[in-house]
Image (spheres, rainbow, N blue to C red):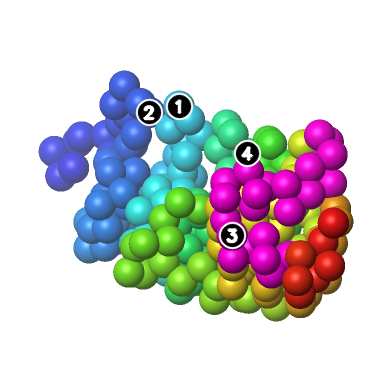
């Protein structure tokens, strides 16, 4: 950089050095590129990801905290698939990153190109076995911040449908307690009970039938 190198140069994927530093959580390098050399904080890759997308996707909290404070950073920037940084953070279920993004104006009901909101992504996440994945707390936080429990994607699937399909009993319980429609149908006419049954999630099926009167 000190010899005239372009700090915003891109590789074949459109990644800049700032994207790389954000991906791997190198906070001091992120600071150096931005403060000393004016790296473009809103540079987008060929897939439409900004450095904040990458930091959120790879759950580097300190980098996220630094980037959201930078002039020109858009916490609502969307990828080519319509994903905001909050969609990534919600899929990974890292509560502190989610809190930081929401505290800086991220829309908890932002839909991606498929109509999926951050709450949808949390309820469908396959990452529940990660030690830092705190799914129920994330769901509670998003709902407390105004996330719509009856949000529908383009197939009319709700967060309850996603949680039931993936067998997430505690999340199903919480969503039902907060207004989710147990009998709600997607465009194929499937309910939460259909989704839970399809994947043989016995405890979810029992809860929906015995506790919620699902038909």
Q: Quadrant of residue 66?
A: bottom left
Q: Earlier in the sequence, mark 2 or mark 1?
A: 2
Q: Position of residue 105 (x, y in %)?
A: 64, 66
Q: Position of residue 46 (x, y in %)?
A: 45, 27
Q: Name the residue at 82% across, 61% down.
A: 214
Tag 1: Cα neighbours inside 10 Å, few (<14), some, or many (≥20)?
some
Q: Earlier in the sequence, mark 2 or mark 3?
A: 2
Q: Name the residue at 59% across, 34% down.
A: 81
Query: Which dot, 2 or 4, sits closer to the camera?
Result: 4
In this rendered view, identify the residue nearer to me: 208 or 110: 208
Q: Is residue 51 left or right of residue 119?
A: left
Residue beneath label 3, please?
Answer: 202
Q: Earlier in the sequence, mark 2 or mark 4?
A: 2
Does residue 47 lie above or below 53 as drawn? above
The N terminus: image quadrant:
top left
Tag 4: Cα neighbours inside 10 Å, few (<14), some, or many (≥20)?
some
Residue 198 painted magenta: yes
Give residue 82's mark: 4
Q: Name the residue at 84% across, 39% down.
A: 189
Q: Is residue 88 visible?
A: yes
Residue beneath label 1, please?
Answer: 46
Does residue 123 lie above or below 102 as drawn? above
Segment colored magenta: 185-208
The answer to whether the residues at label 2 and label 1 have Cβ atoms under 8 Å apart is yes
The secondary structure type at the circle numbered 4 is loop
Does residue 1 lie above or below 95 as drawn? above
Tag 3: Cα neighbours inside 10 Å, few (<14), some, or many (≥20)?
few
Q: Earlier in the sequence, mark 1 or mark 4?
A: 1
Tag 2: Cα neighbours inside 10 Å, few (<14), some, or many (≥20)?
some
The secondary structure type at the circle numbered 3 is helix
For the residues labelled 2 and 4, the Cα–Cα distance comes to 18 Å
Residue beneath label 2, please?
Answer: 14
């Amino acid at each position: 950089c000190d010899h005239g190198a372009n700090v915003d140069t891109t590789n074949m994927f459109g990644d800049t050095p700032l994207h790389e530093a954000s991906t791997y959580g190198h906070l001091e390098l992120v600071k150096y590129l931005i403060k000393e050399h004016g790296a473009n904080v809103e540079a987008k890759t060929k897939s439409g990801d900004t450095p904040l997308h990458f930091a959120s996707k790879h759950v580097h909290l300190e980098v996220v905290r630094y980037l959201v404070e930078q002039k020109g950073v858009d916490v609502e920037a969307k990828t080519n698939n319509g994903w905001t940084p909050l969609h990534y953070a919600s899929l990974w279920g890292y509560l502190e990153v989610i809190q930081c993004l929401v505290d800086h104006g991220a829309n908890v009901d932002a839909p991606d190109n498929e109509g999926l909101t951050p709450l949808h992504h949390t309820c469908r996440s396959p990452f529940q076995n990660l030690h830092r994945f705190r799914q129920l707390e994330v769901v509670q936080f998003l709902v407390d911040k105004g996330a719509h429990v009856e949000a529908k994607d383009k197939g009319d699937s709700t967060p309850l449908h996603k949680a039931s399909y993936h067998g997430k009993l505690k999340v199903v319980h919480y969503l039902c307690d907060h207004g989710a429609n147990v009998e709600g149908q997607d465009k194929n006419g499937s309910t939460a009970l259909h989704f839970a049954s399809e994947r043989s999630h016995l405890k979810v099926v029992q809860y929906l039938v015995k506790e919620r009167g699902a038909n």
